[in-house]
Amino acid sequence: MKTLAAFMVMCSVALYAQQPSSQRTQAPGTDGKLNIIAFGAHPDDCDQRAGGTAAKYAALGHHVRFVAVTNGDAGHQTEGGGALAARRRAEAQEAGRRIGIEYVVLDNHDGELLPTLDARAQIIRQIRQWKADLVLAPRPNDYHPDHRYTGALVQDAAYMVVVPNVAPDTPALRKNPVFMYFEDRFQKPNPFTPDVALSIDDVIEKKLDMLDAHVSQVYEWLPWVDRKLEEVPRDPVARRRWLHETRAAQPTPAVRAALIKWYGAQRGDAVRNAEAFEICEYGARPDEAMIRMLFPFLPK
Ligand SMILES: [Zn+2]
């Protein structure tokens, strides 16, 4: 048995060694910087909801990891399976490279995610390995089952990350991180509450650069779903401009009110591009000082 265990350790070391840097699994250093981890169901979900915020953290030298809980192998009208998963993994890693963050794609099938104990342990390990101060995820109310279950899985991982007997192969955290939800527009059973709203006007082009890396999605699959595929320019420069023009979205009235709370009336009113987050009740509950520590780009 000893020999088998040693062999398995060797195999896993070899596997990790072969992974590109954006798939590496060691924790960031304890250098006084924040460790942020965000979970999306698909490779591009985190980018849509928190790409601007991630770019702001990265610019200040904080450590950000995006995790796609599924490999995206169902998200295309003419491609699928392992070839599509490989294409989307490469797109995600390019997106991460463009703003200086890590991007991990877990190998669960797209469209088939369930809140199983195995999937929960995958999430717990990711949060622990990253020594996360802040965890971002979708709310469990959403049109897409993979999004719903990603929300449920991250909720289920909250608190469990500090329990040493759960997923004991990965050392437990000593304190529960802060967990927050991405913004969404769903109203039932309750609408999204923007506890924190951030201006991303200074990094909007960085966010669009990230999205531009997800060619299979933003220029192929999503326009096809919307029956607008013929509107997408073929030329890469023209389609990047098209992405900019079609992605502009004004903050909702609730997000606008939160922007004014955090930035003051004049600055808050002038923000054109925002990302917002709601505190999850199952993580550590941050007071205002803690929120300012976790979002160091908020004005003093
Ligand atoms: Zn998605």
Image (cartoon, rainbow, N blue to C red):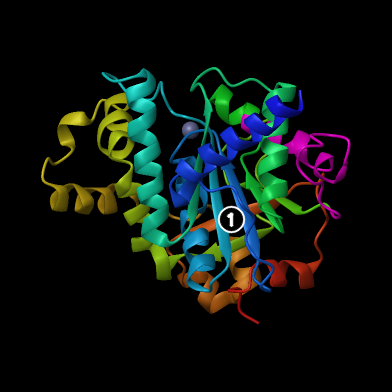
Instruction: Determine the residue positioned at 87% across, 41% down.
Output: 164
Whether the residue carrying mark 1 lies under 8 Å from ligand 1 is answered with no
Instruction: Determine the residue positioned at 28% across, 40% down.
Output: 215
User: Which residue in the structure is indicated by mark 1?
Assistant: 276
Q: Where is residue 73 shown, x and y percent of the image? A: 41, 23
Q: If the image is split into quadrants, where does the N terminus sit?
A: top right
* Relative height, residue 149 to residue 282 (above, below): above
* Relative height, residue 228 to residue 131 (above, below): above
Q: Where is residue 55 shown, x and y percent of the image? A: 47, 63
Of 272 and 123, nearer the camera is 123
Residue 221 within the segment the image draws in magenta: no
Amino acid tagged 1: Ala
Q: Kindly state the secondary structure of the residue where label 1 is placed.
A: strand
Q: Is residue 126 visible?
A: yes
Q: Is residue 211 left or right of residue 70?
A: left
Find the magenta span and give its range.
150-175
Of 97 and 47, nearer the camera is 97
Q: Is residue 140 visible?
A: no
Q: Is residue 223 left or right of residue 127?
A: left
Instruction: Determine the residue positioned at 63% across, 43% down.
Output: 137
Q: Where is residue 165 shown, x and y percent of the image? A: 88, 36
